[in-house]
Image: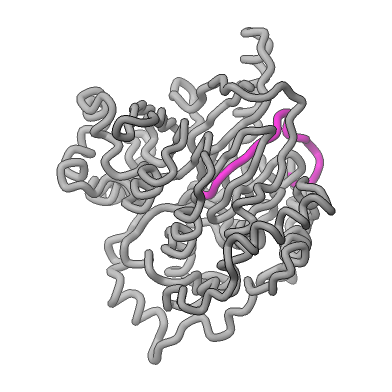
Amino acid sequence: MKIAVEGCMHGDLDNVYATLLHLQDVEKIKIDLLICCGDFQAVRNEKDLESLNVPPKYKSMNSFWKYYSGEKVAPFPTIFIGGNHEASNYLWELYYGGWAAPQIYFLGFAGVIKFGNIRIGGLSGIYKSHHYHSGHYEKVPYNELDIRSIYHVREYDIHKLMQVEEPIDIFLSHDWPVGITDHGNLKSLLRQKPFFEQEIQEGTLGSKPAAELLEKLRPSYWFSAHLHCKFAALVQHGEGSVTKFLALDKCLPGRNFLQVIEVESEPGPYELQYDEEWLAIMRKFNSILPLTIRHADYSNVQLDLQECRHFVRNKLQSRGAKPFDFVRTVPCHDPRQPLANGVFSGHCRNPQTEALLQLLELEYLLDNMSESREFSGSPASFISSSFGYGTEDIPIDDVDDIDEPKEADASETENEQI
């Protein structure tokens, strides 16, 4: 199986697909799957731009909407995770994963899926310690603080991934596992990005939860993006297996944003299928999905994992493991006509998510957020004073992207790359 891996998409699907089609033609190969490591920017219409946390100059429709509308169809099955620059309102509809467009599958805030016999796991977002133990309290439409915190990794999602016991072939994260730079050519990396040095020395370049997952899951491959450079590493897990790590750049001319790998697999054709173990984990922990500022209460978990596994196996044997079909939930961008002001801006229940929960006989909780902030006083003032949002302006690590010098604060490079 030939898999193309892409770093930060930034909504530029047209150019990435065109590059891969050209590569196929020149190299006389067949690409079976495209994987994207975040900042995908699945923006369907102008309203989605309100939930996209980027500086004003980057707020544009780009090309995803063409695939959402059906004007174009992805030439390869595509799987992506979320980064820190996403239409977060749309991804929340697909919290458990689902088709963002025909042939384009979002892996969820955390998830595992099968492509043929290859197991692919992933974690969306980036790590920020001050939100890690919070629940998913953010509510559409997002205020100026929530539009940033919505994509911060939560312990609840990590906890579910830490329950995975069966081998993972490929794992995706947007930011790098902390400490990964110890396993590659550090001198070469620092020649490209000298301002990483202090964070590397302090042990703050990257995600601590991702490093824990790397040690627990020990996948054959781990792909990341976020820091806008190519970096390879080999992680030896004691006397056992090795993880091949690769981070890639964003889609720009002359940048290392694509890599094609060959993975040993059963012969095709290949299709996407739900993963039995992951759906069992999802079923066990769904009832405690934390939707307030408070962390998940694991003492309230009532279901046994093996019983969940048996339940899921029976359901998939009866129904089949193919994900539920794509459904459009909002009007699509039309370049000839601006979107009407009356377009709904709250949470939309995605039929794919509803169908998956019904299959697993689980309650729909994603819009159960009326008491999402369980503290007194102004939510904005509480979060601002407690979590130091003043230091979270979006830095930009590429010299040619900088509008003002103050945006290039090297101390935050791991947190908010654009």
**Toward the viewer: 339 or 22?**
22
Q: Is residue 112 left or right of residue 190?
A: right
Residue occupying the far right of the picture: 318
**Toward the viewer: 404 or 75?**
75
Q: Residue at horizontal 64%, vertical 63%?
A: 307
**Toward the viewer: 342 or 389?**
389
Predominant secondary structure in magenta?
loop
* Residue 245 seen in the figure: no
Q: Is residue 217 left or right of residue 36?
A: left
Residue 177 covered by magenta stretch: no
Q: Is residue 370 left or right of residue 380?
A: right
* Residue 216 seen in the figure: yes
Q: Which residues are magenta?
A: 68-82
Q: Residue at horizontal 65%, vertical 29%?
A: 33
Q: Residue at horizontal 58%, vertical 47%?
A: 112
For residue 25, what is the image quadrant?
top right
Which corner quadrant holds the C terminus? Answer: top left
Where does residue 257 sit, x and y in percent of width and height? 48, 27
Where does residue 204 sit, x and y in percent of width and height? 24, 49
Where does residue 49 sit, x and y in percent of width and height? 59, 57
Which corner quadrant holds the N terminus? Answer: top right
**Toward the viewer: 129 or 243?**
243
